[in-house]
Image (cartoon, rainbow, N blue to C red):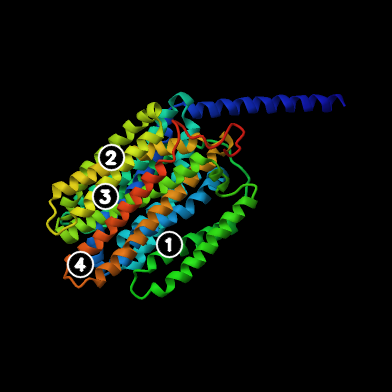
């Protein structure tokens, strides 16, 4: 008995010692050079966000080389956003289930594989498959990036850390069309994929040297039925929305939309019954999160649509080269990055309501003026100025509305809010390309005017819709209250 008691005591001391050592190691990982730990994640997410919009400027050239129309070409952009929105909910689970390094190398490997397949593709189908695989990698990277940032930076540096997240998530998509415009001058669109490949590969080496495993791992199991419902639901819904304007696919639109709506409904219902849902739709009980989600969805619909159709208009109607088209977008991209930084500081002083209303007013005004300026001989300086005004407005909405959304969420639900926000915005961006091309294609085809005048008519219709959407965003912003969200009290009950 004496020996047994002594052994138990030794085991207890050993366990306490191991626990103390583990705590010290975790504390060392958290505070020792956090910038180096997340360096590879910053690079990987910048590349993933860059590839989200990099094809916008290249799309006219790609459509010509592949012999496809806009209704098929837009899927090269849309499928990336669609897959991202589907993968993100599962990624929130995977971040807890697998180690940081394992998940990073899996996501980075998928991104590189998709990029290589797209670069060497001989036709539309393998190129589309490459973009799909890229989207899988990007969807895994985003939640991993944000979660690791929260885990390795101390509280006193969290503001600067989240500023890095905002800069990567916001500036990279804005720079995508600009950089591709410069790269495409007298070069094939394949240079976009070949240019990203060595950087992504070198970043894997950086991760091998600097990335650490952080956070605790859980033993939760992935609900495959939820993943099936969301995959079938969102993809069918998007396919149906994009089929109205497609040649020979309009008859599939309504059945696809019905199937998609059914899948999404089943997905939402199942989440309410799971102890650990992929997405916690209970977040929508928070008024601030609900309003911010609507505004975020509208913002991304308008932003992705504008960044897709403005280069198409500049090259196919006005006759600008890809390089000139990129130069046209450059001031807007730079001002977007600056306004994102400034808006974060102004939010602390004035709150989200005033900033969002003024910004959506600027967005709606810029889009209305763009709609009125769509003609064959529009001066590039005018397009540059209006796009710059538009991007300043976007920058002044994005950061404040994200902070407003999180302000009404109880602490225990914060980990669910990021995947939900990314999913909503990614799907809205994907829907933008599908829906707007579905509008532009039949309007262009039904016009009796010659090329490029008929293309101008279709693009004018698109910008009219984008203006109406911006006005809707302004109307929703009028419902925002106070300096912070007031969606839930401390106990988490709905307001």
Disc with the residue nearer the chain's start (2 vs 3): 3
Between the residue at mark 3 and the residue at mark 4, the CA separation in whole angstroms equals 20 Å
Neighbours of disc 1 within 10 Å: few (<14), some (14-19), many (20+) = many
Disc with the residue nearer the chain's start (2 vs 1): 1
Q: Is residue 117 visible?
A: no
Disc with the residue nearer the chain's start (3 vs 1): 1
Between the residue at mark 4 and the residue at mark 1, the CA separation in whole angstroms equals 26 Å
Along the viewing direction, whichever of 96 and 347 lies nearer the viewer: 347
Q: Is residue 431 visible?
A: yes
Along the viewing direction, whichever of 475 and 154 lies nearer the viewer: 475
- The answer to whether 12 is drawn above or below residue 428 in the figure is above
Question: How far across and how far down the image is residue 313, in percent?
Answer: 21, 58
Which residue corresponds to mark 1?
238
Disc with the residue nearer the chain's start (3 vs 4): 3
Which residue corresponds to mark 4?
454
Question: How far across and how far down the image is residue 467, in percent?
Answer: 30, 52
Circle 4 sits in a helix, a strand or a loop, which is it?
helix
Q: For the N terminus, which image quadrant?
A: top right
Question: How far across and how far down the image is residue 246, in percent?
Answer: 34, 70
The answer to whether the residue labelled 3 contacts the one labelled 1, judged by CB atoms less than 8 Å apart, is no
- Choose mark 4 or mark 1, whichever is in front: 4
The quadrant in which residue 135 appears is bottom left
- Choose mark 3 or mark 1, whichever is in front: 3
Which residue corresponds to mark 3?
367
- Choose mark 2 or mark 3, whichever is in front: 3
Q: Looking at the rendered structure, which numbered label has been put on residue 378? A: none
Q: For the C terminus, which image quadrant?
A: top right
The answer to whether the residue labelled 2 contacts the one labelled 3, judged by CB atoms less than 8 Å apart, is no
Circle 3 sits in a helix, a strand or a loop, which is it?
helix
What's the residue at 43%, 26% (across, down)? 157
Circle 2 sits in a helix, a strand or a loop, which is it?
helix
Which residue corresponds to mark 2?
392
């Amino acid at each position: 008995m004496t020996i047994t008691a002594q052994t138990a005591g030794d085991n207890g001391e050993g366990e306490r010692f191991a626990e103390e050592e583990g705590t010290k190691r975790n504390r060392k990982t958290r505070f020792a050079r956090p910038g180096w730990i997340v360096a590879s994640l910053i690079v990987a997410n910048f590349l993933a966000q860059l590839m989200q919009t990099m094809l916008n400027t290249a799309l006219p050239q790609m459509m010509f080389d592949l012999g496809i129309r806009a209704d098929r070409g837009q899927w090269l952009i849309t499928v990336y956003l669609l897959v991202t929105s589907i993968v993100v909910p599962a990624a929130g689970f995977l971040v807890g289930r697998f180690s940081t390094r394992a998940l990073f190398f899996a996501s980075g490997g998928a991104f590189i594989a998709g990029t290589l397949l797209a670069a060497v593709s001989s036709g539309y189908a393998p190129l589309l498959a490459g973009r799909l695989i890229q989207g899988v990698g990007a969807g895994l990277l985003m939640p991993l990036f944000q979660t690791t940032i929260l885990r390795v930076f101390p509280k006193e540096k969290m503001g600067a850390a989240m500023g890095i997240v905002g800069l990567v998530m916001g500036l990279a998509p804005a720079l995508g069309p600009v950089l591709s415009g410069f790269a495409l001058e007298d070069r094939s669109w394949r240079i976009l994929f070949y240019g990203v490949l060595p950087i992504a590969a070198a970043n894997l080496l950086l991760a091998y040297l600097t990335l650490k495993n952080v956070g605790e791992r859980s033993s939760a199991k992935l609900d495959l039925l939820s993943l099936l419902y969301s995959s079938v639901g969102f993809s069918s819904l998007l396919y149906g929305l994009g089929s109205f304007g497609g040649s020979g696919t309009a008859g599939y639109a309504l059945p696809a939309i019905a199937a998609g709506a059914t899948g999404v409904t089943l997905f939402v219902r199942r989440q309410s019954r799971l102890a650990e849902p992929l997405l916690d739709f209970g977040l929508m009980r928070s008024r601030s999160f609900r309003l911010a989600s609507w505004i975020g969805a509208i913002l991304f619909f308008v932003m992705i649509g504008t960044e897709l159709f403005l280069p198409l208009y500049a090259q196919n109607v006005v006759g600008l080269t890809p390089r000139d088209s990129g130069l046209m977008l450059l001031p807007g991209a730079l001002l977007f990055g600056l306004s994102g930084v400034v808006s974060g500081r102004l939010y602390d002083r004035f709150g989200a309501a005033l900033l969002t209303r003024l910004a959506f007013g600027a967005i709606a005004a810029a889009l209305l003026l763009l709609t009125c300026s769509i003609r064959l001989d529009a001066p590039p300086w005018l397009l540059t100025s209006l796009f710059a005004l538009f991007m300043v407005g976007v920058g002044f909405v994005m950061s404040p509305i994200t902070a407003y959304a999180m302000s009404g969420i109880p602490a225990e639900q914060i980990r669910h809010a990021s995947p939900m926000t990314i999913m909503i915005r990614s799907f809205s961006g994907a829907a933008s390309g599908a829906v707007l091309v579905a509008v532009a294609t039949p309007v262009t085809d039904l016009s009796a005017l010659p090329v490029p005048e008929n293309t101008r008519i279709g693009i004018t219709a698109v910008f009219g819709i984008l203006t109406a959407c911006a006005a809707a965003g302004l109307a929703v912003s009028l419902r925002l209250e106070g300096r912070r969200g007031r969606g839930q009290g401390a106990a988490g009950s709905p307001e």
